[in-house]
Image (cartoon, grey):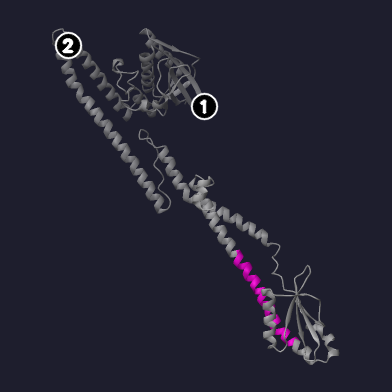
Amino acid sequence: MSVRAARRSGFWPNTLRTRLFLILLAGLAIAYALSFTVLFVERSMSAKAIMLGTLESDVATSIAVLDRLPADQRADLLDRLSRGNYRFELGPGLPGMPDNSSKGREIGGRIEEAIGGTYPIRMESIPGDISRLQAHLTLSDGSPLTIDITPRPPMPIAAWLPYVLAIQMVLLVLCTWFAVRQAIRPLAALADAADALDPNKKGPPLSERGPSEVAHAARAFNAMRERIAHYLEERVQILAAISHDLQTPITRMRLRADMADDSPEKDKLVRDLGEIERLVQDGIAYARSAHGNGEKFSRIDLSSFIDSIAYDYQDMDKAVAVIGLVQGVASTKPHALRRILTNFIDNALKFAGAAEISVERKDEAAIAITVMDRGPGIPDAMLEAAMQPFFRLEQSRNRETGGTGLGLAIAQQLAAAIGGSVRLYNREGGGLAAEVTIRAN
């Protein structure tokens, strides 16, 4: 079956590792089988050549000796002239069938050639369990002579040979697997590094050890990652610079608007300036979160920390509640974590009017803090895109809400800075859940 046919039939594996393994193993196994076949055929041909050489030399001499002896002395010499694969008989021999096989013709031709055509030979095949041939000829005095020939079977295979073949096949499989593993492992490492690539997180570079081709690919990948990180950093720096420079003209415009006479146009201008100012502030916050801050890790009591956030909102008559039992400590950056949770809570209050906070220990090393609401939620196909900067869902989160599309992006940047992660998912029964996972200790 060809590779194309195997692919159509569904038997062709999907992984490159398995494909290379099967191709190399099949090629080496076929080459090994061909070598064994050549050796076996060569042994058979050698055995046949030995048998025919014996017939050609010894039989001619034996026939000449028997022809010169008196008829009454020939019987005493038959056993001495016989060999393992042929013997002489005085008389017409056993009844048989004329033999026209290639083996019979070859044996008969060799004998006739050896005796020089002096005695015409007739070959017959003797029926039975063992393949036997008889060559009939007539000596000079008219006495019939029969040569009973048992063709020598192929040389027997040693009893230990199958075990050696099995060991060789095992070694062949192991060597093939090792070769494929050595060839595929750098490619798998490169794929894993590409999957784990996050320009917002600084990770160890891909190892550049190994063959020159692998080292070259690793260097190219590391250089690509550095370029991506540089481009993103440059983009954030531009955003931060523009946002910072806009603060001065916005402040002047606000002062001029405050000094203007009261009118509907003044109110609209003040609202527009407020919206622009919030956008600039969010841009600066996003740039700062991307670069991280100088805040150090510290251990916090989760119960006190979460309660303080909820009480701050409750003091402003906001419907923020803590559900479940909160206990334990965590190692994090408190201000960064507070900013993440306030972003989640602000979103929940905007789109649902209420928020619930729950804390759950995932394992010994991770704690998940979730802010839940019963608002419109986000379509599943847009959950990942909602984490991107300036992404907005116009259907439910329009400009009237005052959002800039940076809140979740800032939360994601800050979560990366504290060694955590952010996840959004829709709740059963409606609503959205925003989860941040942090280190327990």
- Residue 258: image quadrant is top left
Element at label 1 = loop
Q: Is residue 340 visible?
A: yes
Q: CB of mark 1 within 8 Å of CB of mark 2?
A: no
Of mark 1 and mark 2, the one earlier in the sequence is 2
Front residue of this view, candidates 423 and 329: 423
Whether residue 180 is visible, yes or no, is no
Q: Is the magenta stretch mostly helix, strand or loop?
A: helix
Residue 351 image label: none
Q: Residue 265 carries which label?
A: 2
Q: Which amino acid does label 2 sit on?
A: Glu
Q: From the top left corner, tell me how far across and down residue 413 is, in percent.
A: 35, 28
Dot 1 amino acid type: Glu
Q: Which one is nearer the viewer's eye here, 311 or 113?
A: 113
User: Pointer 1: what residue?
Assistant: 364
What x and y, as percent, mark residue 22?
Answer: 53, 51
Outermost residue, front direction? 98
Query: Based on the displayed image, in which of its 4 quarters is residue 407 positioned?
Result: top left
- Which segment did they paint magenta? 36-62
Residue drawn 80% across the image and 85% down it: 144
The reply, left or right, for residue 363 in relation to residue 308 is: right
**Could you classify mark 1 by the number of other residues whose Cα lies within 10 Å: few (under 14), some (14-19), or many (20 or more)?**
few
Task: Confirm whether the magenta stretch covers residue 72.
Answer: no
226 in relation to 307, above or below: below
Judge left or right: residue 112 versus residue 319: right
* In the image, residue 65 above or below residue 371: below
- The alpha-carbon separation of the residues under discs 1 and 2 comes to 58 Å
Q: Where is residue 357 in the image (x, y as percent from the top left)?
A: 44, 16
Q: Residue at x 75, y 87 (%)?
A: 63
Q: What element carries label 2?
A: helix
Question: Residue 49 in magenta?
Answer: yes
